[in-house]
Image (spheres, rainbow, N blue to C red):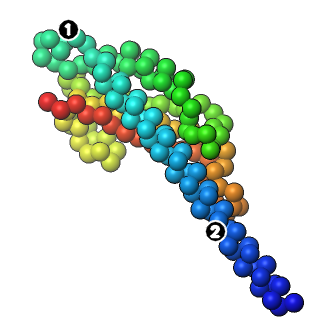
Amino acid sequence: MKSLIVFIGMLLICSSFVFYQNDMGRYMRAQTALKALAEECAAGAALYFDEEAYADGHMIFNETEARAYIAHLLATSEVPSPDVKATGTVAATVSFYDDRGSYGAIVGSFGVVMHPAVAVRLSVTTEDVFRLPFLTVTKLERETMYELPN
């Protein structure tokens, strides 16, 4: 009887490790997919700039077209990944740093912005990623910044 109890205990512990590893893999794939989408949004938004101001030597982003591009990208992509189901839509926070006087701002862990840049933060609420009862992750969030060199 003692060996049965020990076996069941070891089975529960080992199966918990397997579930955790599988769920962590799903979580990492979802984070990687969200990061790639955030990078695509930031890099694509940085391509929309005011041509007349650029001809005068100023780098000013066209925020209307850039936000429309990001909205189109978020509407047509599968977010965050096929493994994790989203319970809501993806929320995007976009910040533009250009020659309108927004240099010198501190952007999260990216430091001080000294060049034209676009920062995008994506967040999405999901179903619980982990199956174990003591781990709960219901929100994924990634932030990236695309900086244009001088």
120 sits left or right of 115 in the view: right
Residue 82: image x %, image y %?
A: 61, 39
At x 28%, y 41%, the residue is 106
At x 18%, y 15%, the residue is 54
Identify the secondary structure beneath mark 1.
helix
Q: Is residue 136 visible?
A: no
Q: Are marks 2 and 1 in contact (CB under 8 Å)?
A: no
Identify the secondary structure beneath mark 2.
helix
User: Which circle marks residue 110 in the picture?
Assistant: none
Residue 72: image x %, image y %?
A: 49, 20
At x 30%, y 21%, the residue is 47
Neighbourhood count class around disc 2 (C-alpha, 10 Å): few under 14, some 14–19, many 20 upward? few
135 sits left or right of 46 in the view: right
Q: Residue 120's image quarter?
A: top left
14 sits left or right of 104 in the view: right
User: Which circle marks residue 52 in the picture?
Assistant: 1
User: Which circle marks residue 17 in the picture?
Assistant: 2
Q: Is residue 134 above or below residue 25?
A: below
Neighbourhood count class around disc 1 (C-alpha, 10 Å): few under 14, some 14–19, many 20 upward? few
Name the residue at the top extreme. Answer: 52
Q: Earlier in the sequence, mark 2 or mark 1?
A: 2
Q: Residue 95's image quarter?
A: top left
Amino acid type, residue under disc 2 in the picture: Phe
Residue 100: image x %, image y %?
A: 22, 22
- Mark 2 to mark 1 CA distance (whole Å): 59 Å
Give the number of marks. Answer: 2
Q: Quadrant of the N terminus?
A: bottom right
